[in-house]
Amino acid sequence: AQKITQTQPGMFVQEKEAVTLDCTYDTSDPSYGLFWYKQPSSGEMIFLIYQGSYDQQNATEGRYSLNFQKARKSANLVISASQLGDSAMYFCAMRQFNNAGNMLTFGGGTRLMVKP
Amino acid sequence: GAGVSQTPSNKVTEKGKYVELRCDPISGHTALYWYRQSLGQGPEFLIYFQGTGAADDSGLPNDRFFAVRPEGSVSTLKIQRTERGDSAVYLCASSQPGQGTGELFFGEGSRLTVL
């Protein structure tokens, strides 16, 4: 069974500073993908960044980067130069490629609050 | 629009009633997913469709929950004899397996409140 753990229920960060949101996962399969989604108060889940288990380099998308440490089974999200609009819930999720479908398993989320 | 559309956005019902929640996926996406999100928690998988068939319904909590996708596009999640514990946001997502990272595209959800 796969499991995603996000140990930080809430985080504060000062505007313009960087913040790291933690995610650890548990799987016995060698092939998997890791996703981060943002969920603002409107409720829609917005895809941010993806890391494949065989990718050699850490993923980056604009201000988002993923600190992937495969041996530790962690996939932390780093947001640089935080903006007020970054205040939202953030979810880490995993997909195993031996699944019949592409369903994702989500962690419990971290609420990020950016202070002006 | 171009995104996943869910209706209604809000539904208030009484215990014991029947409800239907509708999802219109992104055009051309063959895979469709239903998730349930309780307050303060991450989304929990309910059911996955590939085309018209339910490829995995292991997340449905009991036989009061049922979902269909008769023409491989729009899907309806049906809940019979609703209970207060069914109150949650029901999220629908679609994807096109093999495209890009295969990420799921989510709608804004249907918030169900059972009184």
Image: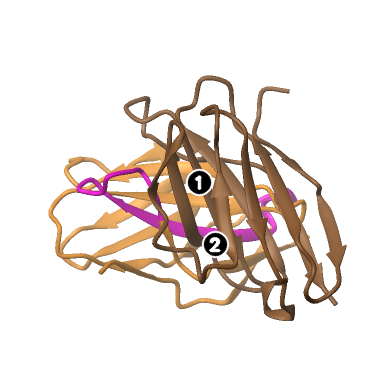
Chain colours: A orange, B brown
**For this view, does A78 lie left or right of residue B17?**
left
**Relative side of B105 to B113, left or right:** left
SS for dot 1:
strand
Vertical relation: A8 (above or below) B104:
below
Which residue in the protein does label 2 denote? B43
Residue segment shown in magenta: A80-104
Q: Quadrant of residue B27?
A: top right
Q: Chain of mark 2?
A: B
Name the residue located 81 percent from the left edge and 49 percent from the top edge.
Answer: B9
The verdict on residue B31 being magenta is: no
Q: Nearer the viewer, residue A16 or B100?
A: B100
| Residue B8 appears in the rendering | yes
Q: Residue A40 at what x, y percent from top left?
A: 70, 53
Residue A35 rendering spot, x and y as whole percentages: 41, 49
Q: Residue at x 54, y 62 (%)?
A: B43
Query: Label 1 to label 2, Cα distance in Å?
Result: 11 Å
Q: Is residue B84 left or right of residue A34?
A: right
